[in-house]
Every structure is written in structure tokens, then in C-alpha cells.
Amino acid sequence: MTDHVSDHPYPFDAILLSSFGGPEGQDDVIPFLRNVTAGRGVPDERLEEVAHHYRHFGGVSPINAQNRALKAALEGELSKRGIALPVYWGNRNWAPYFKDAVAEAAANGHTRLLGLVTSAYTSYSGVGQYREDFEKALADNGLTETASVDRIREYFDHPGFVTPLIEGTQAAVKRLTDAGHAAPRIEILFSTHSIPTAAAKASGPEFGEHGAYEAQHLAVAEVISKAVNEAAGAEVPWKLVYQSRSGDPRVPWLEPDINDVIADLHDEGTASAVVVVPFGFVSDHMEVLWDLDNEAKESAAEAGLAFERVPTSGVHPAFVAGLVDLIVERLENTPVEQRPHLTALGPWPDHETVGAYIARETAEAAAR
Ligand SMILES: CC1=C(CCC(=O)O)c2cc3nc(cc4[nH]c(cc5[nH]c(cc1n2)c(C)c5CCC(=O)O)c(CCC(=O)O)c4C)C(CCC(=O)O)=C3C
Ligand SMILES: [Fe+2]
């Protein structure tokens, strides 16, 4: 093996594909949901409701299969480029857990891990909580002094992440215009996960009332919208909308909700179709399948609007290549001014903002 620690030319000796995890059968559903919400003040009724989404699909979340596919695709791309780094896979909420992934890596002599997180934006859930997960996984293995887990930067505006979304949105708009919908009557709904407004602010208050989280989404929506307008030769209207809110209903979360916006479009009579772009997510997991392909689609049908849902970046070749570019950036310590980014907010720094990290207390306080 050429990847013995002391022989390795890189600052990292393995990749840790880091994700959320999901249940793989009916018996896993409740234990999984308990893991997700441990001490987070999510009401029981909400858990019941979410359990039902998983039950509908045999208790299986699609997210694990998607991560297995992403891992295989990353291994293929790394090997194609001659980069001899193994890829381990760990999750926050279900097996394979981070603790086991870190133990497996260490047993193979890999102790300088580079985390690749399946979350593109800055938030406690996507940044600070992973940092805590990594620290705990090291501590649980007694590896705090001898191993480390760093991570690649938030990649919301990396061309590898955005290109598949641009292609998918252009294609959806074209299908609708070909079917006779006028461009100004097609509403693009850029959809992402709602979070408590206090947590949004804490993701980077210097970026505005709703922090870096909302600012990043707005900036990416602008980029996709511009590319769509160019392809369509017309202005296609758009909105940023939120989905999948949970927690105590008295606590304010980011709005508007996608279903409310669809109902309003009906009342206003300004649209004949919606294109839903789940650009807050990296793969077509449960929150996409249930909250969009089921609920939002139904809202659109009730509102008499044609409905198109754009695929997430998933294992699109541009995304896989982009993730490997982000890895290479860290292996080679590429100067900031040479790092690709499509918005004025980027390139996002390698190390998390203080905001995302301290957001835990704010997020928890907001959930109570
Ligand atoms: C910002 C964000 C992302 C995107 C960034 C990232 O990827 O991190 C994300 C991803 C995901 N969220 C997921 C699932 C769930 N999220 C929940 C609860 C919550 N999510 C939150 C935020 C986010 N979540 C928050 C503020 C809560 C409230 C409770 C808490 O503060 O913890 C709950 C509990 C029940 C409920 O309330 O819905 C579940 C089951 C799955 C897996 C889907 C599958 O299985 O295919 C994925 C990828
Ligand atoms: Fe979530």
C-alpha cells in the first residue's frame, strides 16, 4: 500500500463522506427519528407525521443508497485522476455511524481525514453539528490527540453543484414553454429547508437578518435564474421558498412555505405552472420525495398549476467532478483567488464561520 501515513504526499490520507443517514427498514424508523431529534424539542405529533413518510416507503429512506452511489462515483473519479485516497462513509443519525467510520479508517492507518459533507450551505445542521460529530467520533475512539477530521468548504456556489441545477431548471422551463406555457407565467420556486429564524441569523448575522444561510440561497437562485432567462430568451419569474419546517409551531422559522406560495399563485392568477428546484439539498432524499413530489405536487394540482420538479445534483458527473475539484483544492492548498465560485459571496472559506458553530445554542433555544 502506498497510502501509509508517513509515505503520503498529501495533507490528508483519506476522505470521509459525511452525511445524515436514514432508516433501512420499518424497525429502524423510530430509533432513527429519536437519533435525529435527541433533545431538540421536536413535538411527538411531528415525529408521528414524519414516521408516516418513511413508513410509506417501507421504512427505507433513499438517502443511504444515494450515498453509496456517491461514494462509488467519487472513488471512480479519484482513481481516474490518479489520486490514491480511500473514501470512508459515516453518518450522523444511522449506521454506518461516524464513530465506526473513523475507527475503520484508523485501523487502516488513516488518521488525517478530509470530510466531504452532503450539505452545501452554512447552517448549524450542515456545518457546526458536523464539526461536533467529528470531534465526538474521535473522542469516542480515543483518537482526539492522534487523528483529525477537517472538511471541504461549503460549496453552494461551486460550479459543480450549480451546473446540474442550471441544466435541470432550463430543461424544465423548456418543457413547459414547449407545452404552451408563456415564460412570464412560469414561476420558478427555489426550495430549501426552513430553519428557525434565530438559527438562520446565527449562520452569519453580517449577511443580514436571516444570515449567511438565506444570503447564500438568494445568491445561487440569482445565478440559476440568469442562466435560465438566457436559455429561454425571456424573464422567468422566481421566488425563494421554504419547506419541511418542524419544531414548536410558536417558534418562528424561515418563510414563506412552498405550499402557501403555490396557493397564493392560484389566488393571484399570475402563473400557469411552477418549476420546483430543490436546490437546498444534494440528493433526492425523503424531504424531496415526500414534501415536494407528494405534498407540493398536490398543492400545485389543487391550484390548477402544471408542476415540474428539477433533480438534485445527486451523482451528476459535473457534481462528482466538482467535489473532487474541492478535494484537490485542499490537497494542493490552492490560493483563494484561484478557487471557483459563481457568486460574490464565494469562494467560501475553508473553516467554518463562527456563526455556524455557535448556532447550536441558538438553534436549541429556538427549538424549545
Ligand atoms: C438545514 C437542514 C438540512 C439540509 C442540510 C443538511 O443536510 O444537513 C436538513 C437535511 C435533512 N434532514 C433530514 C431528516 C430530518 N430532519 C429533521 C429535523 C430538522 N432538520 C433541520 C434542518 C435541516 N435538515 C432542522 C432545523 C430540524 C428540526 C430539528 C432539529 O433541529 O434537529 C427530522 C426530524 C423530524 C422533523 O422534524 O422533520 C428528520 C427526520 C434528512 C434525511 C432525509 C432522508 O431520510 O432521506 C436530511 C438530509
Ligand atoms: Fe432535517
Image: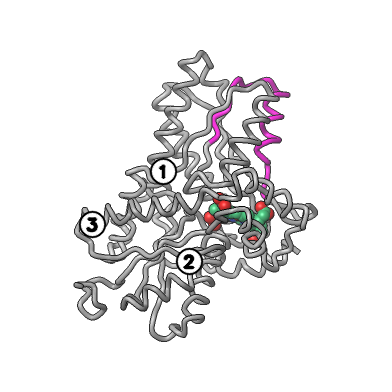
Q: Which residue is mark 3?
A: 79
Q: Is residue 47 magenta?
A: no
When the figure is inspected, residue 125 is found, relative to residue 255, above or below; the finding is below
Q: Position of residue 321 (x, y in %)?
A: 30, 49
Spatial CA distance of label 3 from label 2 is: 29 Å
Q: Quadrant of residue 114?
A: bottom left
Dot 2: few (<14), some (14–19), or many (≥20) neighbours within 10 Å?
Answer: some
Vertical comparison of 185 with 84: above or below: above
Q: Amino acid at mark 2?
A: Glu
Mark 2 sits on what residue? 352
Q: Disc 3 or disc 2, which is closer to the eye?
A: 3
For label 3, the crowd category at 10 Å Cα-Cα, with few meaning under 14, some 14 to 19 and many 20 or more, is few
Which span is picked out in magenta? Answer: 254-276
Q: Position of residue 138 (x, y in %)?
A: 46, 78
Report the residue marked by disc 1. Answer: 162
The residue tagged with tag 3: helix, strand or loop? helix
